[in-house]
Image (cartoon, helix red, strand yellow):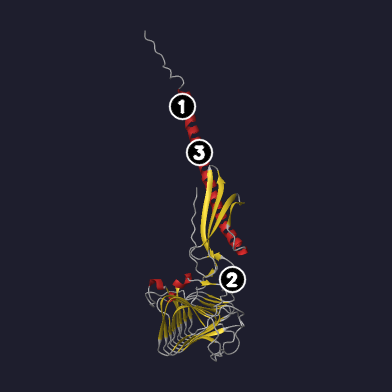
Amino acid sequence: MCAFGISRQPRGVALVIVMLVTAVLLLAGMSFMTISSTETQIALNERASAQAQLLAEAAIHKAIAGLNANPGYTGETDTPLGGGTFKITVTTATLQRCPANAAKDLVATAWVPVTGGTAKAEIRATVDKVSYPYRWAAYAVVPNGIVQGNDYQGNNRTDRELWVLNTSLLDSFDSGGGTYDSTANSGARGHIGANGDVSVEYNTEVKGDIKAGDDIFEGVGVTVTGSKQSNVASQSFPQVTPGTSTSALTVAAGNTVNLSSGTYYRKYLDFGNGASLTVSGPVTIYITGPAVDASGHVVRLGSNVTLGSEPGTQLRLITKSDGAPTDFVRFSAGSGFRFYGSLYGTNTDVYIGDSSQIFGSLIGRTIMMGAGTKVHFDQAMSTQEVCHNGSTFSIRRGTWREIILN
């Protein structure tokens, strides 16, 4: 007789399976907790790093305020602010761009505590009393309403602070990439403006923007590549005192004078027809006055005069740029004038004769460009500075900063 039985499953398998599943879930949970904790720490580190950077920037501005309040300010250490601390060191800059302005090198270091360590940021800057005004092909600084009636050339300029006569061109180029070429090295940054009115006459092409503190007047056939803005806030420019001089620079008709690198002070420039000035390296000429004639000219140039050599970044003329708006002098160039350089004369009325060419930048009290004149703004001039008379330090263009995070 045969007997049959039913086999039993091994006991405890269910418990093992449950334990395995529990272990997997526990491992997954621990992994998620670790990831969550890591992400939280990363977020805290990022926040602390951002705080340290902002704290270092605040320290730089505190140092500037300290220098403006006391030029002898030498810095500070362990100053608490914004959940962290900072240190500022102030030293005399190696490169001094302006006489007696005492540029300073600043190093601001900030620390913000974070779990497991510290976030650190360091910013280095050079501050001085320098301005970078050359952002325009031409800009007239005097406010609207100052100019009334006829100017010294007999032209009616009532409320026309910047006046561009017909068949003119304003564009831009970069002398760092070579000489001006209308196709190979030409751009649309020939911006012009005035704190008063801008008047652009017939058939003029402006490859850039126009900004006016008051109105913009356009003649027939005017084309503007960029934007046009009227009634905008006035642009500010620093006052610069050209100094004093007892000698003039006079060049007879047809003659040429060359200046080597350096800074020169002259009462006035008086050039006959066809005369020219060339430069051998960077030259700055402060034109101090008094005027050459009863009309107030500190620059009086005949026809077909050339000032400067390529590239125009090597010649800077600084005429009267201080005093009240009604205390001004005059810059006058005859027809066929060629200028390779920059003019800074915020209290200088500027007249450019017909069929002239400017390779650089013009800043004047008022500016009148004759018919057929072409102004090619040299973009390389945007980093050129003028040393001003103000008592305030500001960050020099080209300041570099380094962020260090621990």
Q: What secondary structure is marked by label 1?
A: helix
Vertical placement of residue 107 versus 406, above or below? below
Q: Residues within 10 Å of mark 2 (few under 14, many from 20)?
A: few
Q: Residue at x 53, y 88 (%)?
A: 292
Q: Which residue is mark 2?
A: 390
Q: Which residue is mark 3?
A: 34
Is residue 282 rendered to the left or right of residue 199?
A: left
The picture places residue 331, in percent across and down from the top left corner, at 51, 85
Q: Which residue is mark 1?
A: 17
Find out whether the residues at labels 2 and 3 contact each other: C-beta distance under 8 Å: no
- The single residue placed furthest to the bottom in the displayed view is 154
Q: Quadrant of residue 128?
A: bottom right
The picture places residue 190, in percent across and down from the top left corner, at 47, 76
Q: What secondary structure is marked by label 3?
A: helix
Vertical placement of residue 399 versus 186, above or below? above
Q: Nearer the viewer, residue 68 or 202?
A: 68
Q: Residue at x 56, y 55 (%)?
A: 88
Q: Count the marks: how many?
A: 3
First in sequence: mark 2 or mark 1?
1
Kindly identify which numbered label has been placed on residue 120.
none
Q: Residues within 10 Å of mark 3 (few under 14, many from 20)?
A: few
The picture places residue 316, in percent across and down from the top left corner, at 47, 77
- Tell me, yes or no, if residue 163 can be seen here: no
Q: Amino acid at mark 1?
A: Ile
